[in-house]
Amino acid sequence: MTQITEIAPDMYRISTFIPEVNLQFNQFLVRDEQPLLFHTGMKGLFPVVRDAVASLLAPSSIRWIGFSHFEADECGALMEWQTLAPSATAICSLVAKLVSVDDVVACRPAQALADGEQLCTGKYRFRFLQTPHVPHCWEASLLFEETQGTLLCSDLFHQEGDVEPRTRTDVVDRCKRTLVSYQQGPFANYLPYTPYTEQTLQRLAALKPRTLATMHGSTFIGDGAQAFAGLAQVMKEILGGR
């Protein structure tokens, strides 16, 4: 079942729980003059995500489609969305555009954004952040909505289970339990730990986000800087090869 929750003014979390993998898959829709969808979901999720979007605005009006990195749950249904929405343009890093996106999943060329570049959708202003290998993949990036302090943070703060849409409870412990669990199975080391991981997490903490919109799990509302400090410690402990 797909659930829609407003996590900030004009920003909606569209969440589908898949029990076979004990995981929520979340997309985030920004209702503005130029609507933005962050994460497309996999191709198989396209019908339910489309219908969820249709309850909030005309799906054909989507103007921007963002995602962190080249992966099925991030941009697998990009072609379906661009077919439905004739003005929809993918935004991503130059690496993502050149290495994968334009050739594999896009109907039209993606728009590559530079680190720190701003994208205005109307009332809202997004800063593009290049974050190679955070959460993972060479081409990784994130979006920070500056007017409300919302970080669209992809797989960071990953939490298993069919959890509540929003929480003010610390999500770092949940993420730690998930990482420990994953280290015991086929998805071990899915978040790499590199010499640049800690400084990237520090950069994200310095934004002082008030809302952390994560791909898998509850959206966290609270002290984002403190949450990132905790996440950095957890990732170093579990993934840093002590």
Image: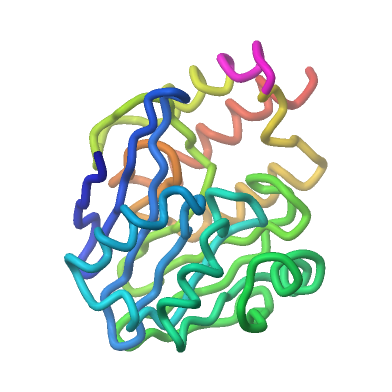
x, y percent for residue 25: 41, 42
Query: What colour scheme has been applied to the protein in the rendered image?
Result: rainbow
Q: Nearer the viewer, residue 22 or 33?
A: 22
Instruction: Please state the total of marks drawn on the protein image.
Output: 0
- Asked if residue 181 is positioned above or below residue 217 in the image, the reply reads above
* On-image quarter of the N terminus: top left
x, y percent for residue 88: 47, 82
Q: Is residue 36 left or right of residue 74?
A: left
* Region in magenta: 180-186
x, y percent for residue 43: 50, 53
Residue at image point 49% right, 68% down: 80
x, y percent for residue 51: 26, 61
Residue at image point 33% right, 42% down: 16
- Asked if residue 121 is positioned above or below residue 71 in the image, the reply reads below
- Residue 182, quarter of picture: top right
Q: Nearer the viewer, residue 44 or 94?
A: 44
- Residue 181, quarter of picture: top right
- Asked if residue 84 is positioned above or below residue 202 in the image, the reply reads below
Residue at image point 37% right, 79% down: 62
* On-image quarter of the C terminus: top right
Outermost residue, top side: 184
Q: Nearer the viewer, residue 193 or 233?
A: 193
Q: Is residue 96 left or right of residue 67?
A: right
Q: Nearer the viewer, residue 54 or 229?
A: 54
Q: Is residue 166 magenta?
A: no
